[in-house]
Image: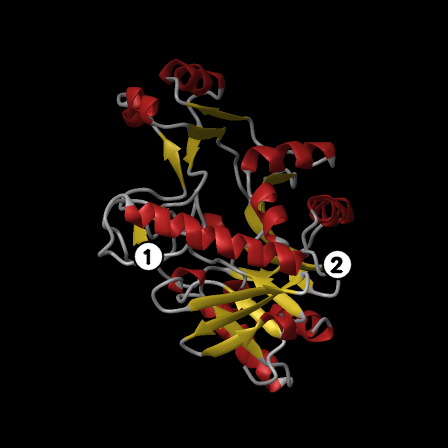
Amino acid sequence: MGNATILIVTARWDTTAYAAAEILRRKGRESVFFYPEDIPQRAQIESVFRKGKWSTRLHTEGGTIDLEDIKAVWWRKPYTSRPSKSLSRVQYPYARRESEYAMRGMWELLLSNPDIYWMSNPHNIRRAANKMVQMVKGADLGLTSPKTIITNNPDDVRNFYDECSQKIVFKSMTGPFLLPGEVEDEYTPETFVPGLPLVRPFTDEDMKHVDSVRESACMFQEFVEKKHELRVTVFEDQIFTCKIESQKSDLTRFDWRRQDSLPHATVGELPDSIANACLKMLDDFGLRFGAFDFIVTPDDEHIFLEVNPNGQWLFVQEWVPQLRLMQSFVDIMARNS
């Protein structure tokens, strides 16, 4: 597709990717989008093996992408293949598996090319996305996390509730969404599950229904008093800290993502020890990007909640433009493509 050398792998709703692609274009770097969900209905894979090597082209609604032209890959938030709804219950999962198999091979070949820059390696993203793995890594690096349990045993929750003086929160491990293909005949891009915030207090009233925990593994954490919160965005070795005054609104007291207006957000400060731990964690995971969440307690202790290895960051740019996240990202991608 023309002079495009940056491949953006994502889903159609990704406004962050569209915004970055436009800034890249203004800097003279053309990018091209590939939506894996379009395979096989709206896009086609053409991979040919000759003389000991594969040559792959992707025929999309936007044009043909020759992977031999690609110098950098931005792995954002792709969905899986979406075969035709006309297929039978047996045919549909088979068609999806075959398409996913072909695309995995395509990505592995790109990953094996040392000359291609990745933001970031999808294998490393998947590993680092697990909160259990993150918390152990954080502890190894000197970060403090809340006391936490993951269980589907109601008695465990009862004991933890008492241990934490009846002050705990429920935390979704995967988010409050169903994605395409996760439920039968569900083909919308993203379905919100009503009543499932990412983090919420677990109360005496909830304890009356605690037996429902048997239906799924659930994460519970001790409630940590907050002075404010930090969203720390890292591109390679560049750190951008956003201070979020989440305690100024009852709506955002437990989860700053639950907001009906612009939050109180400013440029924040991060102690060197915490900043170094963030950089070391990304390096250990083999990542070039990470979005970290911290609580700052009334005693100014920094509590590590999680790192999203493929999290959103455009909202931080919009809340606190002087952080210049977009400029940093675009410069990195342009330099490596």
Between disc 2 and disc 1, the foreground one is 1
Q: Residue furthest front?
A: 51
* Residue pictured at 23% horizontal, 50% vertical: 185
Name which quarter of the figure residue 274 lies in.
Answer: top right
* Residue pictured at 63% horizontal, 47% vertical: 124
Q: Amino acid at mark 1?
A: Pro
Name which quarter of the figure residue 142 lies in.
Answer: top right
- Residue 212 lies, in percent from the top left, at 29, 24
Assign a secondary structure to mark 2.
Answer: loop
Q: Which mark is residue 237?
A: 2
The quadrant of the picture occupied by the C terminus is bottom right
Assign a secondary structure to mark 1.
Answer: loop
- Residue 329 lies, in percent from the top left, at 64, 69
Q: Write down the residue under mark 1.
A: 83
- Residue 242 lies, in percent from the top left, at 59, 58
* Residue pictured at 46% horizontal, 19% vertical: 160
Q: Amino acid at mark 2?
A: Asp
Colouring rule applied to residues: secondary structure
How packed mark 2 is, by other alpha carbons closer than 10 Å (few <14, some 14-19, many 20 or more), is some
The residue closer to the viewer here, 326 or 304, is 326
60 over 80 or under it: above or below: below
Q: How far apart are the two marked residues, 2 and 1, measured between alpha carbons?
A: 40 Å
The residue closer to the viewer here, 54 or 63, is 54
The reply to whether residue 232 is visible in this rendering is no
206 over 52 or under it: above or below: above
The residue closer to the viewer here, 55 or 272, is 55
Pointer 2 with pointer 1, Cβ within 8 A = no
